[in-house]
Amino acid sequence: MLSYQHAYHAGNLADLHKHALLATALEYLTRKDKPLSYLETHAGRGLYSLDSAEAAKTGEARAGILRAEAQGWLAPDHPLVAALAQVRRSYGPQAYPGSPLIAAHFLRRGDAAHLAELHPAEHDALSAVAGFASLHRQDGFQMAQAVCPPTPRRGMILIDPSYEVKADYAAIPRQIGLIARKWNVGVIALWYPILTDNRHAPMLDALTQAHPDALRSEVAFAPARPGHSMVGSGMWILNAPFSLAEEAARLEALFRKNA
């Protein structure tokens, strides 16, 4: 259950989709001079290297963020570009931020952050770069249920499991329902993989039935290698910030054009 290592996949097309939406949402939320809370249930290590042996083995970053930067998929003033630039200034030109460090770029003095990561090695690595946050070495859903509603009450939670346990798909609608009841003003963002067997569909059906007004964004792309089952990326966002639908539509059109 703790075998997943995102270092092999950092900066791939799914990260590009997820992180562009995350950065856009956080940039909008931090325009107001009011404090907020940022939560993550599955934070990972927070910082990755695109020239690592893991990245070289899969080549997913070359087809993802590196291709996007070379071809101008993100405008110079895009919030993700700003977050990438800050991380590279601090950690070098081959650094790539996980979502915790993307959030760190936008969070201000007075904002709060809670990051959960259960994997021992990933948690240790996260501890080295996430001094801005309260770290929780525990199941991310347990953390979310304990912390919500957070202080400050404004804010956002990112739910980004590895889905290496198939039971996650059945459990997530209930977990989100509990979070939403406790924290009805929170932005609740769920990332999910789109696989060839369409196993995410019942989860999305349950979420749509319970929360029909949520934003849903999906993009498709070719498998990273022959036999690879992930062929797209999805983001489901409850209480989506204003203008996020516009960015989602832009990304969806961009992925269709470059498929």
Image (cartoon, helix red, strand yellow):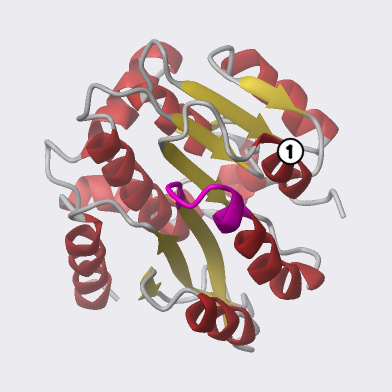
Where does the C terminus fall, quadrant-wise? bottom left
Q: Is 36 on the left-hand or right-hand side of 225?
A: left
Residue position marked by numbered label 1 in the rendering: 146
Depicted 87 relative to depicted 243: above or below: above
Name the quadrant containing residue 200: bottom right
Please tell me in which quadrant of the rendered image residue 32 appears.
Answer: top left
| In this view, 144 is above or below 152 | below
At horizontal 71% and vertical 64% (from top left) the residue drawn is 163
**In the rendered structure, which segment of residues is drawn in magenta?**
179-187
Q: Is residue 166 left or right of residue 112?
A: right
Mark 1 element type? helix
Q: Nearer the viewer, residue 52 or 82?
A: 82
Looking at the picture, how far across and down is residue 169, in whole percent? Answer: 70, 73
Residue 83 on image: x %, y %: 32, 29
Number of residue marks? 1
**Going 42% across and 31% down the picture, which residue do you hit?**
103
| Residue at the image point whose x is 54% and y is 76% from the top | 207
Residue 129: x and y, percent? Answer: 58, 17
Q: Can the viewer see residue 95 in this picture?
A: no
Question: What residue type is disc 1 on?
Answer: Ala
Residue 46: percent from left, percent from top: 57, 30
- Quarter assignment of residue 218: bottom left
Q: Is residue 40 left or right of residue 111?
A: right
